[in-house]
Image (cartoon, rainbow, N blue to C red):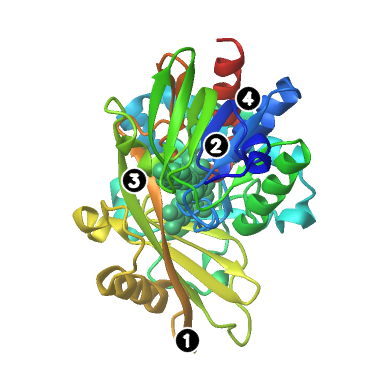
Amino acid sequence: MLSIWEKQTFFAPTDVLIAGSGFVGLWSAYFLKKANPSLRITIIDKGIVPTGASTRNAGFACFGSVTELLLDVETMGTDSMLELVEKRFRGLQTIFETFKASDIHYEQCGGYELITAREHERYPDLFEKIAWLNDAVSPITRKKHTYRFIDEPKAFGFENIHSIISNELEGGLHSGWLCRMLLLKVQEMGVIVLSALGIEAFNHIGDHLEIATDRGIVLKTNYLLICTNAFAAKLHASVNISPARGQVLLTSPIEGGVPKGAFHCDEGFYYFRNLGDRILLGGARNKAFDEEATAELAVTDRIQSELELFLRQVVLPGRSYTITDRWSGIMGMSDEKKPVIRQLEQHVYCAIGLGGMGVALAPTVALEVADLLTQR
Ligand SMILES: Cc1cc2nc3c(=O)[nH]c(=O)nc-3n(C[C@H](O)[C@H](O)[C@H](O)COP(=O)(O)OP(=O)(O)OC[C@H]3O[C@@H](n4cnc5c(N)ncnc54)[C@H](O)[C@@H]3O)c2cc1C
């Protein structure tokens, strides 16, 4: 039973209840409060800390590698590809305008794409394609040559790589600190954030909504914004988002140092970066798509051994290290590879399905859904 004090403060009726305190939920609260400081907003998350993708990712602050964007052109067309690049680029600018680089451990270390012999065969005209892509993205990045071939790809010490494309506008940040700084910011703005409280269902009662939670507490709100990403399908029949698990490993510090930067390979299915003198490597989902289409937070021998093989054969050939950490996070994938930002029914909205792009994309998605809600 709740006390009157609890009912009138932590669990008081709100104007907007946000489910999910990942990047999208937090940025949404931020933009809603910025637009209207008097809005009463509560965020609930079923985890003790945000437990989907935002605190479990690789922290790449990136807006698209060459083969990823060329694939997007094939699947969604040039205009949609550029729209996504623009949203990611704008999202990154929002992060840098909102937080000091040192607070979120951001380093503009450069993004690099490792081109394998197979990809080189697939794109024999890669040089021309890069020239085309540079022209296409230059109105967004305001740079003539966003992507360039590296003159001395061997300098990184990678093996089994044909060539490397660099993008100096990309970098890496600390996702834990970005989440924490966002939490502090929205709390300073007056948002109530409740952890370990999951939404189970909602009901329209008169002109408001009642939110049933997994602790038996019922919350009242005028509007519900669903930001539970991969877990959103449970809440609304019309939501078509599939879970995709991403697994990661981290090495011990490596004597002699490691290549610095945020690296992609194999159309983005493998990604690694340095964390000081350690390598954080994730991906290999393409080796077991069906098995990894799950919301279960676990690591598997199959994917972890693929990651270790990649580490030995490509990233750190002949080097000594141990694996100190392994974890996984869950992405939410939409059918169109685009975030789903819409009104689901009266007083209920969602902003979900950011796939593997949410670090950069979340601020832009959140601003869009906040606009949708405030212009309702
Ligand atoms: C391994 C991995 C690596 C990645 N690397 C990168 C990268 O380098 N760069 C990049 O841009 N993107 C990356 N991503 C993707 C990025 O992390 C996501 O797109 C982004 O974090 C999505 O944010 P979100 O707020 O939509 O979802 P989430 O962070 O998943 O947040 C959803 C929240 O909802 C909560 N929740 C679930 N069910 C309920 C419920 N019933 N009630 C209340 N709360 C609930 C969860 O606990 C969670 O905190 C990666 C993802 C993974 C998994």
Residue named by callout 2: 361
First of labels 2, 3 by sequence position: 3
**Of the two numbered discs 3 and 4 in the rendering, the one whose residue sits closer to the viewer:** 4
In three-dimensional space, the C-alpha distance between marks 2 and 4, rounded to whole angstroms, equals 18 Å
Residue named by callout 4: 139
Q: What element carries label 2?
A: helix
**Of the two numbered discs 4 and 1 in the rendering, the one whose residue sits closer to the viewer:** 1
Residue 362, how many percent across, how many down?
A: 56, 37
For residue 67, above or below residue 39: below
Amino acid type at image mark 3: Pro
Residue named by callout 1: 322
First of labels 2, 1 by sequence position: 1
Residue 267, how many percent across, how many down?
A: 37, 49
Quick one: label 3, few (<14), some, or many (20+) residues within 10 Å?
A: few
For residue 13, above or below residue 160: above
Q: Is mark 2 within 8 Å of ligand 1?
A: yes
Q: For residue 129, which quarter of the picture?
A: top left
Q: Is mark 3 on a helix, strand or loop?
A: loop
First of labels 4, 1 by sequence position: 4
